[in-house]
Image (spheres, helix red, strand yellow):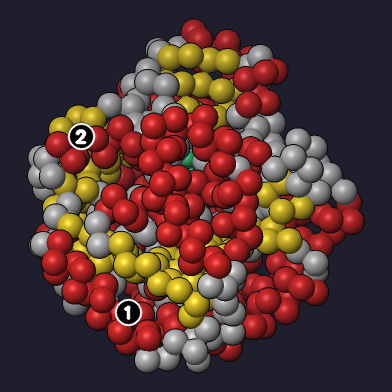
Amino acid sequence: MEDFKKKLQDSSFEGEVLDDLETRVFYSHDASLFEVLPELIVAPKDAKAVEALVKLVAENKKTIPGLSLTGRSAGTDMAGGAINDSIIVDFTKNINKIVSVTSERAVVQPGMYYRDFEVETLKKGALMPSYPASRDMAAIGGIVNNNSGGEKSLEYGKTADWVAGLKVVFADGIEREVRPLDRKALDKKMAQKDFEGKVYREIYELIEAHYDAIKAAKPKVSKNSMGYGIWDVWDRETGVFDLTQLITGSEGTLGLTTEVEFKLTPKRAHSGLLVFFLSDINKLGDVINTVLEHKPATFEGFDDQTMILFFKLMPSLLRQMGAPAFLRLMINMIPQGFMVLRGYPKFIMMVEFNGETTQEVKDKIHALRLSLDLKRRQYNITAYEEDGTEAKSEKFWLMRRKSFQLLRSKVKDKHTAPFIDDFVVPPKYLPEFLPRLQKIIRKYKLFATIAGHMGDGNFHVIPLMEIEKKSERDKILPAMKEVNKLVLQYGGSLSGEHNDGMVRGPWLEEQFGTEILEVFRKAKAIMDPDGIFNPHKKANADWDFSYSHIRDHF
Ligand SMILES: Cc1cc2nc3c(=O)[nH]c(=O)nc-3n(C[C@H](O)[C@H](O)[C@H](O)COP(=O)(O)OP(=O)(O)OC[C@H]3O[C@@H](n4cnc5c(N)ncnc54)[C@H](O)[C@@H]3O)c2cc1C
């Protein structure tokens, strides 16, 4: 790597190049349970520097076979997608600006944090609505390359639905625009004699050769981040060929994203929540199905462990929020004190409705309450709170969004071990699925918090473990295999939004079968023939590599 570093510094590449141990250790982690020490960290100055970097890596790949590039935005990936053993390319340092924004479209660089991006879109009264729960920490490049989703995905879908165009540095070191093409434009692209022409031609031929199998492989759930979104690239009926759908969610394994054009949606004028407590979750599936009949905008939930941890971690929150905001929060929490007196909740459900007026929102909330009330005993509902405005709802959103974040840094003897953190099961199967899941959690004595996007059947089960103990680490593979098998038995997906990374990439064959895994491998080989982008992920992941990099110290 010394040689390569020198070549890079002598080349036209502009930007920071770091290899001191402290920096390498920092970049050896994301929010996953893995640790991989990189050799070099670079922060290109601009897209030209990314091009120079990719060209140099491609030229040197034969003499230094281990050389590779892993894109990194905010590094909050929960699956190990943003770490690797060669070169990490940090986009947040320099390639982090907003290029343009209107009420309908925004063009933004990948290193911009979502929280800063949202300030700009809100000035135009608009939102990119598939932001993740990690909205305060994540950046655009990761949101796109994970095909992230979040609390608004029930109504608005995932990031792939909001990407209008991308700029990507391809494996030959050239930045290109990628957009949906009609048949005529596709034919023109495929006729090109360069690397781009070859990519379009071969991806088109690959999809045509497996057309029906590819279309049938798309998971039948409302959210999926497993595999490559190849089923949404070419549609014979509409004649549209959209390579953005392959790249979005690809974990930087097909190229490095240097710019994103998003479609935006107007921010709804008013919203409010119906919150209710369940004393038992054995009817959770039925509850979810009843709520979905009311077509809510968002439908989230979290368990008692999440709530208890939230209260325990209040001092950290006080430091994060500052005293005035914290005091407001405490005053708003008083009604919950009374709700808890009526029965300690096992699960807290949050159902959000939007509307043009406050009254419309209140009416929708109340209508749901009335229908739930009809089955109150059967559903084990112990209390309700109708929060008709955003201000009143804030406390629940804080619990839902902040808990995992606080959990990661503040629980002393145990560590978050996300390995069954993102599965999706069609909501209609949840009454059967959930008791079986709980049985597995009990069997392996996993102390786990459960939260998630109830309306999509997308659950985040995050065990807290003494991961430095071998006996604890030994539970990971068998417990994960049992949960994966159960999820697939119900036609689910192993990842709704956190993506495969090192934790789920090895199970793509279980999820999709051999033909589709082979299609994924070919797509990767077409776009990245020398294997320079983010190895050990997606179709090239393997459990031995992943297992050998589980963190055994913190
Ligand atoms: C508390 C918490 C809550 C979370 N909640 C959610 C949630 O609700 N929904 C959800 O989807 N995720 C969630 N996540 C996971 C993660 O935060 C998101 O997926 C987020 O969008 C990742 O953004 P990032 O900027 O941190 O990406 P990173 O971690 O930096 O990268 C993510 C992936 O994108 C690739 N990548 C990044 N930038 C580029 C680039 N410029 N070019 C090519 N590849 C690139 C990386 O290689 C990696 O594979 C959560 C994580 C935490 C810690």
Is residue 181 visible in this depiction of the protein? Answer: no
State whether residue 506 is above or below residue 367: above
Question: Is ligand 1 less than 8 Å from the beta carbon at label 1?
Answer: no
Q: Quadrant of residue 102?
A: top left
Nearest to the observer: residue 345 or residue 57: 345
The residue shown at (67%, 49%) is: 416
Q: Which residue is mark 2?
A: 120
Viewer-nearest of labels 1 and 2? 1
Asked if residue 401 lies left or right of residue 120, the reply is: right
Question: Is ligand 1 less than 8 Å from the beta carbon at label 2?
Answer: no
Which residue is most to the top? Answer: 10
State whether residue 77 is above or below residue 108: below
- Among the two numbered marks 1 and 2 on one chain, the one whose residue lies closer to the N terminus: 2
Residue 119, position in %: x, y?
Answer: 24, 35
- The amino acid type, in three-letter code, at marker 1 is Arg
Residue 104, position in %: x, y?
Answer: 11, 48
Residue 81, position in %: x, y?
Answer: 56, 46
Q: Which residue is mark 1?
A: 369
Neighbourhood count class around disc 1 (C-alpha, 10 Å): few under 14, some 14–19, many 20 upward: some
Q: Quadrant of residue 7?
A: top right
Nearest to the observer: residue 244 or residue 471: 471
- The amino acid type, in three-letter code, at marker 2 is Glu
Is residue 365 visible in this depiction of the protein? Answer: yes
